Image (cartoon, grey):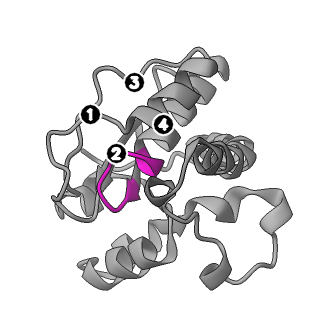
Amino acid sequence: MYRIVTVCTGNICRSPMAEIMLTRAFEEAGLADDVVVDSAGTTGWETGNPIDERAAVKLTELGLTSETHRARQFDPAWYAQRDLILALDVDHYEDLRLEAPDGECRGRVRMLREFDPSSAGTPVSELGIYDPWYGDQADFEETWQMISAAVPGIVQYVLEELARGHAASS
């Protein structure tokens, strides 16, 4: 089983959107039994809260459900238990890499937009997806677009990783 976690600040906007969108993409690619995606926040500020209503509206437009989502904080044990840790913004990326227990785990932390072909060659410092929580529905639309552009690249990357036999041990 290949395990992915998407990470933002509070786990109510960006990371659950990415989790749900990636889960569908892996199902559509026939990998539902091989890949599991979950999400978390770098903080515990929103722990237990549902997905932001504006994120839910966007996902519902796409035929995706989010009613069961509850925010949670990233658990340091996941460094060893996840094959790919996808940060949604630069501060998440920096925090996750700083807190990683070793170089191997640090190498599992990537920016989600690194997998968007149109972002090739863009410095990590410019790959963040700003927090739509401070905006309106248009900001959630833009967040969806940025995540959506990276999804095919993530699926392709995981297919290649599975072909090489790469997956966390637990």
Local SS, label 1? loop
Q: Which residue is mark 1?
A: 50
Please say if the residues under marks 1 and 2 sit with CB atoms less than 8 Å apart. yes
Distance between the Cα atoms at labels 1 and 3? 8 Å
Local SS, label 2? loop
Inspect this view and state whether residue 35 appears: no
Please say if the residues under marks 4 and 3 sit with CB atoms less than 8 Å apart. yes
Amino acid type of the residue tagged 1 in the rendering: Pro
x then y, percent, for residue 120: 81, 70
Front position in the image: 162 or 10 = 10
Amino acid type of the residue tagged 3 in the rendering: Ser
Distance between the Cα atoms at labels 4 and 3? 9 Å
Looking at marks 1 and 4 on the same chain, the residue that comes earlier in the sequence is marked by 1
Q: Which residue is mark 2?
A: 12
Please say if the residues under marks 4 and 2 sit with CB atoms less than 8 Å apart. yes
Amino acid type of the residue tagged 2 in the rendering: Ile
x then y, percent, for residue 88: 50, 61
- Within 10 angstroms of label 3, few (less than 14), some, or many (20 or more) residues? many
Local SS, label 4? helix
Q: Range of the magenta residues?
A: 7-15
Distance between the Cα atoms at labels 4 and 2? 8 Å
Q: Which residue is mark 3?
A: 66
Q: Residue at x 35, y 50 (%)?
A: 168
